[in-house]
Amino acid sequence: MAEVIRMPKLSDTMTEGVVANWNKKVGDTVKRGEILAEIETDKATMEFESFFNGTLLYIGIEKGKGAPVDAIIAIIGEKGEDVNAILAAEKNKVPEKKEEKVSEKKIETVVAKKEVAKQAPKKITVHSEENGNRIIASPLAKKLADEKGIDIFYVKGSGDHGRVIKRDIDYWNPSKMPPVMEYDISVNKAGEYTDEPVSQMRKIIAKRLSESKFSAPHFYLTMEIDMMNAVSVREKLNAKGETKISFNDMVIRAVAQSLKSHPKVNSSWYGDRIRFNHEINIGVAVAVEEGLLVPVVRNADKKSYAEIGAEVKVFAQKAKDKKLQPTDWEGNTFTISNLGMFGIDEFTAIINPPDSCILAVGGIKDTPVVKDGKIVAGKIMKVTMSCDHRVVDGVTGSAFLQTLKKVLENPASQA
């Protein structure tokens, strides 16, 4: 009897996968436990083994193509067995519909949305002062919209003459945005170009970060930290140790130690409840060619600089080789994104769900500082913490950063 092979769900965020490679072709003999294909998920490329013995009768997804989770990707059975009946049944399968009581108000909303969709223009219009469609908004509203990543064009103003004011930004709901308008690409006005299909990883990154940015009310806290003592301690540790310690390793450990004193920052928003995590698992953003991966250093508060450094190096290599496994990236309670090594002084990062905070770390700069009334040389590093205001208040976030500053400016006590 033929066995149907479906696209597996290989991670908690996976909705579809791409077949990176087939290790077998139609007509080949397949044994249980053999690697049938390599599946690219949103975070890694993983080997997919066969659970059946038989002949590969059918391949439903070509190499490099994608399919949603649970779609037929292959069929294994006896040599010469007909698979047309299976494919026909799959094609004619009607998805189950859950019964749902629909209120009159909901029906009206659906009808209204359909009417808006019918009236939506097919070509985008550029609004500016020149074509008479100038957007009127207060300076504060414009500033808030820019900070929250809101396109002020879509915000309906409640002030005089339709002026967009602060409360319009505060209560703006992205679900009320009109349907996405399409650009007219019939004429190539940009000259020569190359289109590349969006990778599965990039699709998920876009989806998750958009959801985070527009659902979690972000606010930002920036603090300067004098890293002069940290530089000295790092030099001493690297002079006598076999494992070279980076400033990023020092930041990870300092964050983990600080979270022990501020459990509210080590928390997650779950709609009807807030989860205060007892373990401190630090997600470390790692850049790869197709986007960003966030492997997790578990129980970071219980590990030394050397242990954290060795773990991060392994994760970085596995990420580049697309060998990370679900256990490597699940369970983060706080995330760090460090761009200091790329010459970035400071930046803001989007919260990595389900975390309530993410710390953006800039580079260390030689900067004059005032100590005891005198100007002396200092090595300043700026950090900016993005906080979910539903969970972490300004005072709570500020207290955490004060502790982090104290730990990093006195690292000898933590070594």
Image: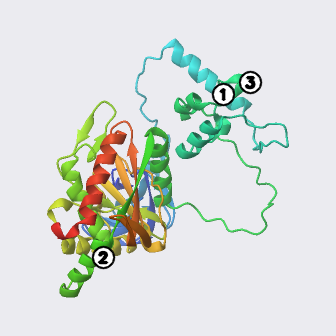
Residue 35 seen in the figure:
no
As shown in the figure, which amino acid type bears the numbered disc 3?
His
Q: Nearer the viewer, residue 43 or 50?
A: 43
Mark positioned earlier in the residue sequence (2 or 3) = 3
Which residue is identified by label 1? Answer: 157
Rendered residue at 74%/24% (across/down): 161
Quadrant position of residue 10: bottom left
Q: Quadrant of the C terminus?
A: bottom left
Residue identified by numbered label 3: 161
Label 3 CA crowd tier, 10 Å (few <14, some 14–19, many 20+)? few
Circle 2: is it few (<14), some (14-19), or many (20+) Cα within 10 Å?
some
Badge 2 vs badge 3, beta-carbon distance below 8 Å:
no
**Label 2, on which residue?**
231
Left/right placement of residue 66 relative to residue 230 reads right
How was this image coloured?
rainbow
Task: Report the residue at 35% width, 39% height from top.
Answer: 393
Identify the secondary structure beneath mark 3: helix
Q: CA distance from mark 2 to mark 3?
A: 57 Å
Residue 304 in the image: x percent, y percent?
A: 17, 70
Residue 198 percent across, percent down from the top left:
55, 60
| CA distance separating discs 3 and 1 | 8 Å
Q: Mark 1 or mark 2, which has the lower sequence index?
A: 1
Which amino acid, by three-letter code, is at mark 2?
A: Val
Q: Label 1 sits on what residue type?
A: Gly
Q: Secondary structure at mark 2?
A: helix
Residue nearer the viewer, 7 or 225: 225
| Whether residue 183 is situated above or below residue 296 in the rendered picture | above
Quadrant containing the N terminus is bottom left
Pinpoint residue 14: horizontal percent, then vertical percent. 39, 52
- How far is mark 1 from mark 2, CA to CA? 51 Å
